[in-house]
Amino acid sequence: MLTRLYFSFTFFCGIWVFSSNRKHFLATLLSLEFMVLVLFVATYYYLCSFNYELYFVMLFLVFSVCEGALGLSILVSMIRGFGNDYFQSYSVLQC
């Protein structure tokens, strides 16, 4: 029961940081990775407590690494194109 409360608290802390930090793109990526890490640990403990196979955990790690690589590639292309990672300097309406 305590671990469930701990995982939900840390996950909601990640959601809070994600929704409150709107200045830098790197900070939002870090908060997303924090939430993915909390979900990974919670899934690992859940699967280990019922003696399930850990194939799903490996698949989850593969997708989270792909998500992180995609986020970093978007960050690098934004920094090369605009020179910084501020959200205020981007305009969605420009082509």
Image (cartoon, grey):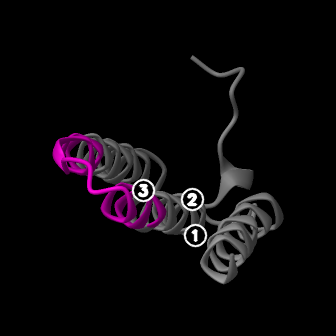
Q: Say what secondary structure mark 1 lies in.
A: helix
For label 2, the residue is 25
Residue lying farthest front? Answer: 50
For label 1, the residue is 27
Circle 1 or circle 3, nearest the eye: 3
For label 3, the residue is 43
Q: Earlier in the sequence, mark 2 or mark 3?
A: 2
Q: Is residue 83 above or below residue 7?
A: above
Residue at image point 17% right, 43% down? 55
Marks 2,1: beta carbons within 8 A: yes
Q: Residues within 10 Å of mark 2 (few under 14, many from 20)?
A: some
Q: Say what secondary structure mark 2 lies in.
A: helix
Indicate the amino acid at tag 3: Thr
Report the predominant secondary structure element of the magenta stretch.
helix
Q: Is residue 64 above or below residue 40?
A: above
- Where does the image place residue 90, in percent across and percent down from the top left? 65, 42
Q: Which quadrant: the N terminus?
A: bottom right
Indicate the amino acid at tag 2: Phe
Q: Earlier in the sequence, mark 1 or mark 3?
A: 1
Comparing 50 with 92, the one in front is 50
Q: Is residue 95 above or below residue 3?
A: above
Q: Say what secondary structure mark 3 lies in.
A: helix
Q: CA distance from mark 2 to mark 3?
A: 27 Å
Indicate the amino acid at tag 1: Ala
Q: Which residues are magenta?
A: 42-62
| Badge count | 3
